[in-house]
Image (tube, coloured by chain):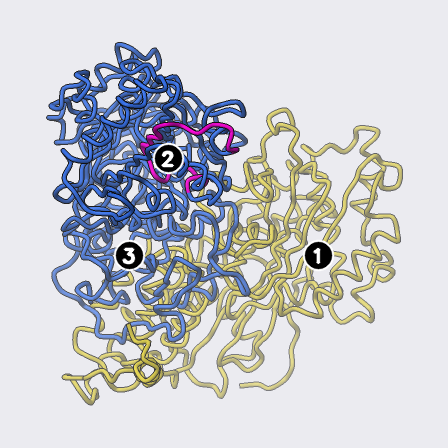
Amino acid sequence: MSQKKSGFHPAGYEPVLLARLGKPNSRHIDGYVADGGYSSWKKILSGVKTGEWTPVKVTDLVKASGLRGRGGAGFPTGLKWTFVPPKEKRGGKPVYLLCNCDESEPGTFKDRLLIETDPHQLLEGMMLASFALDVKHAYIYIRGEMVHGAEYLNEAVSEAYAKGFLGTDIQGSGLTLDITVHRGAGAYICGEETALIESLEGKRGHPRIKPPFPAVSGVWSSPTVVNNVETLACVKHILDRGPDWFKTLGRNEKNTGPKLYCISGHVERPGVYEGPMGLPFLELLALAGGVRGGKKIKAVIPGGASAPMLTAEEVQSLPLDFDGVAAAKSMLGSAAIMVMDENTDMVKAVTNISKFFAHESCGQCTPCREGTPWLNKMLKRIVAGQGKRQDLDLMLQIANQMGNGMTICVFADAAIAPVLSGVTKFRSEFEAYIAKSAALDYQLPAPAAVTDKVAARVAEGIHS
Amino acid sequence: MAKVTVDGREVVVPDNGNVLEACRIAGVDVPHFCYHPRLSIVGQCRMCMVEIEGMPKIQASCTVPVRDGMVVSASSEKALAARNATMEFLLINHPLDCPICDQAGECKLQDNAFAAGLPVSRTSEPRRQYPGYDRTGIGPHVIADMTRCIQCTRCIRFCAEIAGTGELTFIERGGHTIVWTHEGKVLDNEWSACTADVCPVGALTTKDFRFRKRVWWLDKARSVCTGCEIGCNISIEHRDRQVFRFLPRPNPDVNDYWMCDYGRFRAEELNAQDFTRPVVKDGGSTKETNWGDALERIQKAVDEAIKAKGAASILVIGSANLSTEENYLLNSLFRTRLGVPNVEFVVDNGALRRIKNPKAEGNQEGWLKGLESAPNSRGAVAAGVTRALSDSALEKLSSGKFTPAVLYVADAAFAKKASDPAFVQAARKAGFVAVHARTKNALTEVADVVLPVASLSGKEGTFVNSQRRIQAFSIAIVPPPVVRTDMEVLLHLGKRWGVFDTRWTAGDVFELLKKEIPLYADAERESRAVAGYPAVISPASAYDSIFSPEEAEAKLIAAAAEGRNG
């Protein structure tokens, strides 16, 4: 396989979201404005008083573009915006826009690139969305680990204030908008929109019972729209170039626009690649230099750790968009494509993913709190050579008991996807481990930490 | 109101109700852990799963508000499978050592495991342990054992929403989640033991009761707390003539589901019984005697005093700790029959007690407040006993301006004053002192006659609380031989002047109260036949019957649904 470095986008494709990647000082406002940035926001600021620009017009443009949420669920963004109750039905409550920058899905790193290289693109998108939604205060909830990202975003926000793109009565337009950057504490679950809202309110990141949905009662019980970084960045480009242009990028009417793909795993050049929505998997793989060492593919996770795994056959003609991956019974999610080559130990891979979910379960709902560590313990036991014949069927049964409405949020569904798909599609590998199992009459030793503790208590005479 | 069909039964549910409440009103028992009628809905135990027509996924019934025309299948195969799944998840890490757990017998996990759990365990993984978080006191009254916790957060929500103090929280996350106090805090609020009440498992237990008695041996009697004027409804739990604990008895009009630690931990004080036979003073020495002799001495002293100095030379002290019936008998005998003008009582103001109940009549900013440290000052007044003011005979006695020929004290611990040395010295100057007493105090030391009486657990009658609600309490324990209740003592004493019939029960005296006391005119007394316990239902209260389960439960649930906001 060729080691020659090629671009981060397909030949002939003009990058949109990453257009300014690599420019010196791309994250500062001067360069951004020089490249034509904030032109849409200026258009609105000057057009709002004349009535040329109305919130409905912006929403309609976004609706017409067919933009779907880039955070993972792929819900139509324009439609989501229309769920916010009209002003007279809000009872005086403000509307909040939250930018979900809690990018924690294993294998996903596109939002981080966006905010670290071109944060003003996101800010402009947020300004336009705020105008469409009558938002006076917008928040960016950024994952705690993204220290530089938070720093750059804060810098960008102060630059926007200094240049008069944010604040009260912006450039005499009568519009008011403040943007606050809020750092999370690094919990995966805080990327779930209601957990994000709880966390922003200063509480533990526990997903809320839905309904009510955030559009009706979100942060501080007010109507709230939560959008992903990439989604909001796309809004800027829709306003710049119009929905018809936006639709030309994409496989069909329902899957439109530019898309960032994070490819990782056993490929020559893992990283973020931009292409149109619906880029064929093989084309993306070729951009990334193919499978490392010219090996064969064994499995691909197309949308982050929570997406069901696909086999090499299933990805041969896979278009990478929401409906294309869904048709293959997986999901595009955050477009975090993880490639595993033929030498990958799938049992260890599934165990590793299940460890992540056992660690990140918030602990609210019984099936998830108890089920994720149970699955992980069983997998670890199989890897340790202590598997039992009934383990595989038991794992599938347990996994099926956890998802599909058994929990408040979809974390459990995400946690069982790799186990269900891994055990089903690569069952022979699991069976090989179990066949080598040392002990079918396996006995559990009591953990030393516990026995020591009890012994100490007995010695102190306070064992009760 | 919404019409909901549960397993083919149509029921009417208040609009704020949820599907779980609809199921319970319909008499379908949907198991649950985290739902509590007075705490916010979190829907996180995932035990109360049901199928609802029109919703493709299975639903936690407590999280779904009722809608008119909803059709719920609470017992479908899918619902039962979902609940079995949750039970399995709860049990993979919960220790299966019910025999050594103090919650056994009143454990929801145990009950639900018996009702719906799998007969075998499919796990062979090591059970989760919490070194450092097991069997540890987290406050003055509560011991926490996280190995038993099922993370339902009822205790956290109790502290945050009812007590308003928020000591408890989740620490760690996922499978390691621990319910504990915030760093540097202890679980020390006025109602901390209620966290053990709401805990469905043995994770939180009270220090006082822990490992004292298996709960299935305990008998229960409906009673009323005597700690303050709120009159929280309680259940006296006893066995072998010994009181082990009080539990709050739910009453949405008074104490709701709660009671304070002060009231709760007075339970074992009821077991004290210093006097088991009447004691009389004979020429400077004390001796035990029989009831005939003791009452004879009192009769003689009273008759002589009236003959020599007139009825005004007698002072009778009633008590706000006595039932209205007892105060009424005291007043009838001394004031009405014998013409004694000084039948008085005095009540202390103690520490302020509070019970959260925003819906209760007479609440102040959501709280029922009790300042008086006795349960029945209003009943005593209604019975005709005079509240002692500054110019009363009782106050004159305290200040030495009045020395009665006979001092008759119907409750040796009527107030703090009873153990005040100055008062006792003044009282001793009286020609003759008779007291009803259960435990020794300074007053019993100086009395000429001490009549041994039973504690609250041995009596029945009614109290009138700060809301002017008449509340009945019933007998838990038959008093020891020879010891009599205050009412029996007064009946036997009255018989000597020909006024009372010694066969009267508290019920008979209650009928007299209905005729003669306006406050009691509309009160209804349930027949003894109902569950074997007498109960008074004052006009506004229909919740006294917690021991006749279905109806009361449905009423409680309906009240819970009506009371919830949104």
Name the one closer to the observer, B553 or B326. B326
Q: Mark 3 highlights which residue?
A: B209
In the image, what residue type sits under mark 2?
A: Asp
Q: Which residues are magenta?
A: B399-418
What amino acid type is highlighted by mark number 1?
Val
The Cα atoms of the two marked residues, 2 and 3, are separated by: 22 Å
What x and y, as percent, mark residue B252? 36, 30
Q: CA distance from mark 1 to mark 2?
A: 44 Å
Residue A310 in view here: yes
Helix, strand or loop for the magenta stretch, by majority? loop
Which image quadrant is residue A59 in? top right
Residue B280 position, x and y percent, is 23, 41
Q: CA distance from mark 1 to mark 3?
A: 51 Å
The chain ID associated with circle 3 is B
Residue B416 picture location, percent across and down: 45, 41
Front in this rendered view, residue A56 or B311: B311
Report which quarter residue B62 is drawn in.
top left
Letter of the chain in blue: B
Disc 1 target residue? A181
**Magenta stretch: residue B413 in it?**
yes
Q: Which mark is residue B256?
A: 2
